[in-house]
Amino acid sequence: MQANVKTLPDDERELVTFRVGEQDFCIDIIYVREIRSWTPATVLPHAPDYVLGVINLRGAIVPIVDLARRLGLPKTMLGDRHVIVIAVVADQTVGFLVDAVSDIIGVAPSAIQPTPDVTAQTTRMFIRGVIALEDRMLRLIDISAVLPPLVEQAAS
Amino acid sequence: MSISLPLTLAVLDGMVVDVAGQTMVVPIATIVETIRPEAGDLHRLADGMTVVAVRGRFIPVVDLGHVFKFREATKTYSDLVYLLVESDHQQMWALAVDRIHDQRQVVIKGLEGNYGHVPGVAAATILGDGKVALIIDPEEAVQRTDADQPVPDHSQLKDC
């Protein structure tokens, strides 16, 4: 990859970066509707373990996903400092529990490197690419892959 | 034949109950009566099912806390309050809950849009304190125990 290629700013993608576990992740800002502090969720019966429950977001019922658990990391130990990133993807509104939101950065598409070839299936499923930022590695999350699958009407 | 109503603007008369620490709503229309039986009115059947005697009739008990996996099958059935519900097929069931809070009208909010269908749950609502409470579908909730088997989690199978 050429490091000296200067891209136009409007070519840049804006990414919201946040920490989950001890790792840095980011998602495209166009999916992010808001960031709010953690409020206890109402438990959903029969839900996958990464779904913490549902919260009331100004009258809408929004499911909350523990992003760490979803990405195969140890479960988030809930504290007051955690935040929920509310994302809207194709009419589905979902909140993602993360440890902390760090920054909003502009990244040229060329700076996004393909995900190193690893065998871990969760990484292959959920990570679109990686970005080198200072001495950190940002993992770009494929937002549509981490959404809880819309549970269809249980046929009975 | 069935008619589906738009969920978003519907209002429902509900009984707000406590199920193993979770606040839930049972549609009043499905409740025939509420009872608090004596310990002697509760009888166990061989297969682990409990029935409650109400005026000479034996009605099967369904512990909602167990249906929704909030707790293991309880042993202290006599501490619970029972909501007698009648299904479409005139079958009576006694839904066991921990406490009845009150009775109020709630606005029905769909879960389908952002999450999907939850077995035994018809929809959700928002209570006065801003918290979300799930509205129980009694008919479907009792069917979960009918089979009385561990529920296979479909979404977990897809996940890896």
Image (cartoon, coloured by chain):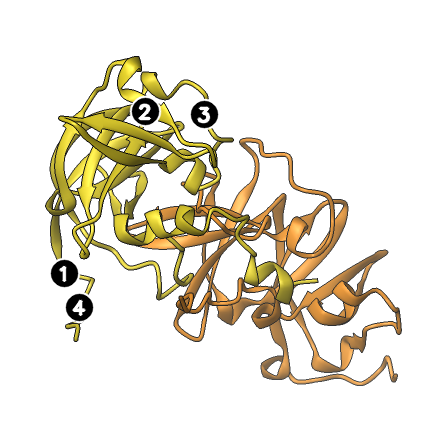
Chain colours: A orange, B yellow
The alpha-carbon separation of the residues under discs 3 and 2 comes to 11 Å
The alpha-carbon separation of the residues under discs 3 and 1 comes to 37 Å
Badge 1 and badge 4 both on one subunit: yes
The alpha-carbon separation of the residues under discs 3 and 4 comes to 37 Å
- Closer to the observer: label 3 or label 4? 3
Which residue, given by chain and number where applicable, does mark 4 sit on? B6
Is residue A36 or residue B13 the one in the foreground?
Answer: B13
Badge 4 and badge 2 both on one subunit: yes
Is residue B68 or residue A129 the one in the foreground?
Answer: B68
Which residue, given by chain and number where applicable, does mark 3 sit on? B74
Q: Which chain carries label 4?
A: B
Q: Which amino acid does label 1 sit on?
A: Leu
Q: Which amino acid does label 2 sit on?
A: Asp
Please state the horizontal and vertical placement of residue B43, each as a whole percent of the image: 35, 24
The alpha-carbon separation of the residues under discs 4 and 2 comes to 31 Å
Which residue, given by chain and number where applicable, does mark 2 sit on? B98
- Closer to the observer: label 3 or label 1? 3
Q: In this view, does A111 lie to the left or right of B138?
A: right
Badge 2 and badge 1 both on one subunit: yes
